[in-house]
Image: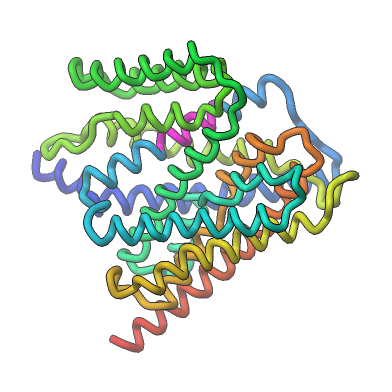
C-alpha cells in the first residue's frame, strides 16, 4: 500500500495530474473571458458589487495559496536545484524585466503602475499550450517551474501596490503565519485548518491595506511537504482545492474582470492596447525565450523549444487581470490594458502552440 502511495504522489505523477486539471480549466477560463467580452460589448453588461468583490478576493487568495504550495512542492521534490534552478531563475528574471521595461518605457506616466500586470504568467493557459503544442515532459516541467516563479515575482510586485500599510495588521499577518507554520507541524492539522488560516490572513492583509496575494502565498509556502510514505498536508490541500480553484473560482474571476467592451473608453489612449501586447508577447519571448536560448545546453533543449516556452509564458490572462485590478482599477487605463492582455494571451497561445509543434517536429527529425 505504501508503495502505491509513493507512486501516486511522486513528482512526475503529481505534475501530470496538475497539468491535466489546468488544461481542463483553461477551456473554462477562455470561455469565461469570451462570454465576459461579448456581454459587455453587445449587451452593455457590467457586474460589480460587494459580493463580486468578495468572490474576487476568495479567488485571489485561493490562487496564491496554490502558488505557494506549488513552489514549496518544486523545492521539496528537488526540481528547483542545481542548474535547473539557475536557468529557471534567470529566465524568470528576464521574463519580468523585459515586459516591465517595455511597458514603463512606452506607457503614459499615469499608467506606469500597470507594469505589475505584464510580468506574470497564467499557469492554466500555459499548461493548455503545453498540451496543444505537444511539449516534451522536460519542457513542460521547465515552463511550469518558470510560471510558478513568475507568479512569485508577481506576488512580490503586487506587494508594492499597497499604500501606507497599517503596521498592526502587518505584524498580525506575520504572527499568524508563524503560528500556523509551527502548529500545523506540531498537531498535524489538515486541509480545513489551512483554508481557515488562509482566509484569516487574506482578511488581515486587506485590513492592512495590502494586496492579499503575498499573505496567501506565505501560508501555502510554509505548509509541510513531502512525506515519503503518505500524502503530505500540502499535497492533500492542493489535491482538494486545486480543481475548484482552477475550474470554478478562476473562471468566475476572469468573467467578472473581462466584462470589457471592445472599444476604447473616453480619456484612454488606444495605443496602450498595443503597448500592453508588445510588452507581454515580445517581453516574454525576449526575456524567457532569449535566456533559454542562451542557456539551452544546460537545459538540454532546442532553440525552438526555448522560444515555445517564452511564447507560452506570455499567456498572462488571469494573473495579469489581477495586476490590473490591483494597480489600475477605476482609472481610464484599466479597460485598455485589460483589452491588451486579452489580445496578448490570444497571440501567445497561437505562437506557443505553433512553436511547440515545430519544436516537436524538429526533435523528431533529429531522433
Is 90 or 238 nearer to us in this picture?
90
Is 245 or 311 nearer to us in this picture?
311
- Residue 143 position by quadrant: bottom left
Magenta stretch: residue 64 in it? yes
Q: Is residue 143 left or right of residue 350?
A: left
State the residue at coordinates (41%, 33%). Answer: 217
Stretch in magenta: 58-66
Question: Farthest residue in the top direction?
Answer: 168
Q: Position of residue 71 (x, y in %)?
A: 34, 43
Q: Position of residue 230 (x, y in %)?
A: 15, 34
Quadrant holding the N terminus = top left
* Vertical relation: 140 (above or below) 58: below
State the residue at coordinates (52%, 17%). Answer: 203
Question: Farthest residue in the bottom direction?
Answer: 365
- Residue 256 position by quadrant: top right
Dominant secondary structure of the magenta stretch? helix
State the residue at coordinates (50%, 74%). Answer: 355
Q: Position of residue 295 (x, y in %)?
A: 35, 71
* Vertical relation: 184 (above or below) 347: above
* Vertical relation: 156 (above or below) 203: below
Quadrant holding the C terminus = bottom left
- Residue 351 position by quadrant: bottom right
Q: Position of residue 312 (x, y in %)?
A: 50, 62
Q: Is residue 213 left or right of residue 341?
A: left
Q: Is residue 250 left or right of residue 43?
A: left
Is 355 or 82 nearer to us in this picture?
82
Magenta stretch: residue 173 in it? no
Amino acid at each position: 500500500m505504501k508503495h502505491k502511495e509513493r507512486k501516486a504522489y511522486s513528482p512526475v505523477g503529481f505534475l501530470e495530474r496538475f497539468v491535466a486539471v489546468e488544461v481542463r480549466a483553461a477551456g473554462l477560463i477562455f470561455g469565461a473571458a469570451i462570454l465576459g467580452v461579448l456581454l459587455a460589448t453587445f449587451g452593455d453588461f457590467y457586474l460589480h458589487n460587494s459580493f463580486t468583490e468578495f468572490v474576487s478576493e476568495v479567488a485571489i487568495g485561493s490562487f496564491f495559496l496554490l502558488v505557494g504550495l506549488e513552489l514549496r512542492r518544486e523545492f521539496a521534490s528537488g526540481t528547483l536545484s542545481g542548474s535547473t534552478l539557475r536557468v529557471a531563475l534567470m529566465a524568470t528574471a528576464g521574463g519580468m524585466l523585459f515586459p516591465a521595461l517595455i511597458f514603463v518605457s512606452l506607457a503614459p506616466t499615469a499608467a506606469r503602475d500597470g507594469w505589475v500586470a505584464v510580468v506574470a504568467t497564467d499557469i492554466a493557459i500555459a499548461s493548455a499550450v503545453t498540451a496543444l503544442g505537444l511539449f516534451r515532459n522536460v519542457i513542460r516541467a521547465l515552463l511550469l517551474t518558470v510560471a510558478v516563479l513568475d507568479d512569485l515575482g508577481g506576488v512580490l510586485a503586487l506587494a508594492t501596490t499597497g499604500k501606507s500599510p497599517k503596521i498592526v495588521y502587518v505584524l498580525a499577518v506575520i504572527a499568524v503565519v508563524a503560528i500556523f507554520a509551527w502548529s500545523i507541524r506540531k498537531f498535524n492539522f489538515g486541509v480545513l485548518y489551512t483554508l481557515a488560516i488562509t482566509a484569516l490572513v487574506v482578511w488581515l492583509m486587506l485590513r492592512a491595506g495590502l494586496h492579499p496575494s503575498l499573505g496567501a502565498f506565505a501560508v501555502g509556502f510554509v505548509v509541510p511537504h513531502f512525506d515519503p510514505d503518505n500524502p503530505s498536508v500540502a499535497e492533500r490541500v492542493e489535491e482538494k482545492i486545486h480543481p475548484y480553484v482552477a475550474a470554478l473560482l478562476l473562471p468566475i474571476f476572469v468573467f467578472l474582470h473581462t466584462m470589457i467592451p471592445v472599444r476604447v473608453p473616453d480619456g484612454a489612449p488606444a495605443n496602450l492596447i498595443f503597448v500592453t501586447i508588445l510588452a507581454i508577447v515580445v517581453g516574454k519571448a525576449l526575456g524567457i525565450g532569449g535566456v533559454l536560448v542562451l542557456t539551452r545546453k544546460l537545459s538540454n533543449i532546442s532553440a525552438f523549444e526555448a522560444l515555445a516556452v517564452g511564447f507560452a509564458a506570455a499567456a498572462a490572462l488571469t494573473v495579469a487581470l489581477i495586476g490590473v485590478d490591483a494597480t489600475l482599477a477605476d482609472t481610464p487605463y484599466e479597460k485598455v490594458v485589460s483589452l491588451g492582455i486579452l489580445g496578448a494571451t490570444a497571440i501567445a497561445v497561437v505562437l506557443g502552440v505553433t512553436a511547440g509543434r515545430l519544436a516537436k517536429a524538429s526533435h523528431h527529425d533529429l531522433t
